[in-house]
Image (tube, helix red, strand yellow):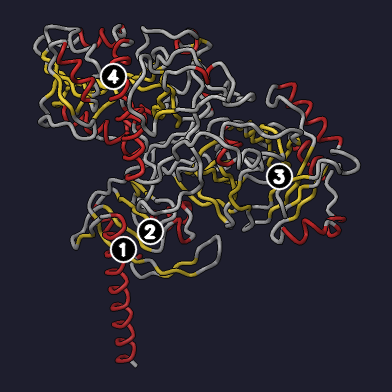
Amino acid sequence: KTSKGHLKVCKMKKKVLRKQVRAQHTLMKHEGIECVSHATQSLVIANAGLGNGMSRHQLLRIVGEHGLVETLLMPPNKPYSFVKYGTTEEAKKAFGALNGKEVTLEDCGQNIVLYINFVEKVLWQNAVPTSLPPGLMIIEKIISPEEERRMLESIDWIGYEDTQNAQKTLKHRRVKHFGYEFCYDNNNVDKDKPLPGGLPEICDLFLENCLKQGYIKHKPDQLTVNQYEPGQGIPPHIDTHSAFEDEIISLSLGAQIVMDFKHPDGHTVAIMLPRCSLLVMAGESRYLWTHGITPRKYDVIQASELGQKVGTITADVGDLTLNRRETRTSFTFRKVRRSPCNCIYPSVCDSQKGQQRQVQPSFPHNEMEASVLEQEYVHKVYEEIATHFSSTRHSPWPRIVEFLRSLPKGSIVADVGCGNGKYLGINEDLYMVGCDRSKNLVDICGEKNFQAFVCDALSVPIRSGSCDACISIAVIHHFSTAERRLATIRELARLLRPGGMALIYVWAMEQEYKNQKSKYLKEKNGSKDEEEINTGSAQRPLSDQMPDSNKQNSACSDRLLNDLKDEGCDAKPVADSRLPVHTNRTSFHSQDLLVPWHLKGGTKKKRESVDTVVFPAGSKESQELSPVFHRYYHVFCEGELEAACRSLDCVRVQKSYYDQGNWCVVLEKL
């Protein structure tokens, strides 16, 4: 018996060792984190992650029995976690007690075995907080618990079985329609056959209050009530453009839920919809982003604000846990559309499919597409318009001048993206050198006897740590992916010596800030004094009904640290979504867009980025001979530039501010 028992113990130890080694390889392969053979304060615990059903509360209790836990990191969707103890001795004690131990997951009753390894200090880079998609708003606690009870009781599910259409199509949730029945076979409504009875009286009262509070502009006339059990969801979709008007609102009753929004470029935002909250989708969030609920029994949410969090779920590995879903009922209100949709997103609009429109580039889905987009709609455009562009860029902006004049005498300063060099001669006490992607603009610098050369902002041929200061004015917003924008900031930091300063300006999504319109919106006839855009007064009439942008503070999407995978140039895009063309001197309705430049003096060359037919036949603009070039821009939301800078551990944000339609940051190299 002793011999058999000893053999069993040996087999078990070998199995645990085998699993330990496998966990080591997994961690190295997926995260680049190497396990060590000597004892440290930090452990990695395999099979104890959010990805396999372990909650933060349970894991804290397990590891807390063996010493003081300084840090517990639980990466989203991963089957492992990291724990740091106050001392190495406590970590060794936990290792001996927990390695190979079987535990039962509290939330699902499944038995798992923990496998543990020592690791050195774990530096996990958190995802930067993301913003809501443009046009999206969440109003918390819009109704009281009593009103919630009455609304739920107003729905009679007894006659649900008689709803044949919904019964056949929706096998995984209960649904009822009011006002008009939604036909799931064609994703539309029969506008000529309203349902008898209209909307429930309590819903009418609720909508009247929403109108009074200014949450909606039009009173909906269609209601869909869905009831979801834990584990049920809805597939990602965009509500049919031709079926419903701009605003779509959804009331969450009974339980909270995480809803996933996805942009055509692959960027996703997980948004917490608390119980008794109202989701309002308008503009870009309604027309361009898909929304859906992933079928699962648990949501990954912020642990510190369990049941309280409103808005986006940030992947803070030190503050994530699992939340068991409960039965949720949604009241989704829409207004039936009576005329074709004429939105600015024709590629996803069923009303506009098949219509002859100008071919516009798509959102880039990988590095190759991004490079091609920037080559055609940034680099080539500026080569063509350099002379005209330079003639509109002669007045330096005061706060940039102030920054340059504040630098010590003899400072070496690089102007990355110098354009025609208007900042290169501001302070004669500085040694300034400029660089730009446009050869023609660099030639103009040479004509002014400024030192400048041609290069890409992603790779500046200047020795690391050799600059006392750098400026990047109206450059980074021309890069078409979050990774490339972050890489340009990292390149600026590389040029700086420790203690060196950098000033960055990018165009802002918020052209109306603190109730003040920017010069861009004020000066309808164009302004040669603007740093950012001077595109003339001719405008392309894209749509008669433009989405509302008054809620931009809560309606911007942050693409920072977007874990997009390069699928190769042959990969199929998420959606065939074209970049919208901006109407000059108006508010922005999309973060990624094409901005027209009306060239004066004509051009002999014809590029993909040039419009030859951009206006409706017979219009006044169609008779103009001057070509129109389109430049790609990513306009930044409030906090987006600062968040990108803070994600780099080699710099410190000294100051951030808003200056005439631009977001600005001053960095210091650490």
Give the residue number, with chain letter if any, for mark 1: 26
Give the residue number, with chain letter if any, for mark 3: 330
Identify the secondary structure beneath mark 1: helix
In this rendering, would 218 be left or right of 536?
right
* Residue type at the position of mark 4: Ala
Identify the secondary structure beneath mark 3: strand
Are discs 3 and 2 less than 8 Å apart at CB?
no
Question: Residue 150: x and y, percent?
Answer: 82, 40
**Residue sitting at 29 percent across and 56 percent down?**
43
Mark 2 or mark 1: name the one nearer the start of the chain. Answer: 1
Residue 426, quarter of the rendered image? top left
Mark 4 or mark 2: name the one nearer the start of the chain. Answer: 2
**Residue sitting at 57 percent across and 53 percent down?**
294
* Residue type at the position of mark 1: Thr
In this rendering, would 618 be left or right of 69?
right
State whether residue 3 is above or below residue 228. below
Question: Residue 305: x and y, percent?
Answer: 52, 39
Identify the secondary structure beneath mark 2: strand
